[in-house]
Amino acid sequence: MIIKTRLFGEIKISKKEIITFIVPILGFHDYRQFILIEKETAFPTFWLQSVEDPKLAFPVVSPFSVDENYSIKLSSQDCEDIHVREVDETLVLTLLVVPQDILSIRTNLRAPIVYNPQKKLAKQIVLQEEKYAIHYYIMDNRN
């Protein structure tokens, strides 16, 4: 199938590539199907491209690449929702905010997306502990 995207033009994908969000990304309740597009940049960056809306794409990054001490634990419900036994079976990503001021690039370490690449299921979770910043600035020392 071919999907249209604002950033990448038309992309040919297989239905097997479509990721289904069990719970929509916070603030985007009308969208549940995405594909993951990898782009090489200064650090490993991916794009979550909506299959349902060509204009909707989120830059995402592995939180482990921005905070070497990052770790999360999944609840039994989270594991059940995306069909995994533990977090090691997932790809963990966080949404990037990329404003015009490059020094203000940030990610929300408290609301990661956990993705089961085997089953193509994903879910954004909100961590209850406050040890991770909602606005983690990647390019400077405001953290």
Image (spheres, helix red, strand yellow):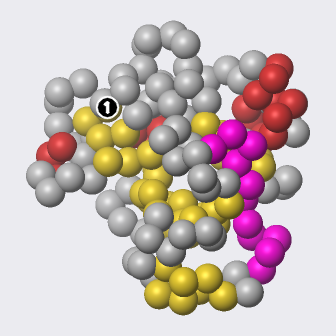
User: Viewed as shown, does residue 78 lie left or right of 99?
Assistant: right
Q: Is residue 36 visible?
A: yes
User: Viewed as shown, does residue 62 lie left or right of 24?
Assistant: left
User: Viewed as shown, does residue 109 lie left or right of 135?
Assistant: right
Q: Which residue matches tag 1?
A: 136
Which segment is the magenta one? 14-24
Question: In percent of the image, x 40 and y 34: which residue is there?
Answer: 108
Work out which residue is located at the far left of the displayed protein and give it.
101
In this rendered view, identify the residue nearer to me: 68 or 45: 45
Determine the image quadrant of residue 40: bottom left
Question: In percent of the image, x 47 and y 87: which residue is there?
Answer: 9
| Depicted 14 relative to depicted 141: above or below | below
Judge whether residue 15 is colored magenta. yes
Q: Is residue 117 visible?
A: no
| Depicted 34 relative to depicted 88: above or below | below
Q: Where's residue 27, x and y in %?
A: 48, 41
The kind of residue on which mark 1 rests is: Tyr
Q: Where's residue 97, x and y in %?
A: 32, 48
In this rendered view, identify the residue nearer to me: 57 or 131: 57
In this rendered view, identify the residue nearer to me: 45 or 25: 25
Q: Where's residue 119, x and y in %?
A: 85, 53
Give SS at disc 1: strand
In this rendered view, identify the residue nearer to me: 89 or 111: 111
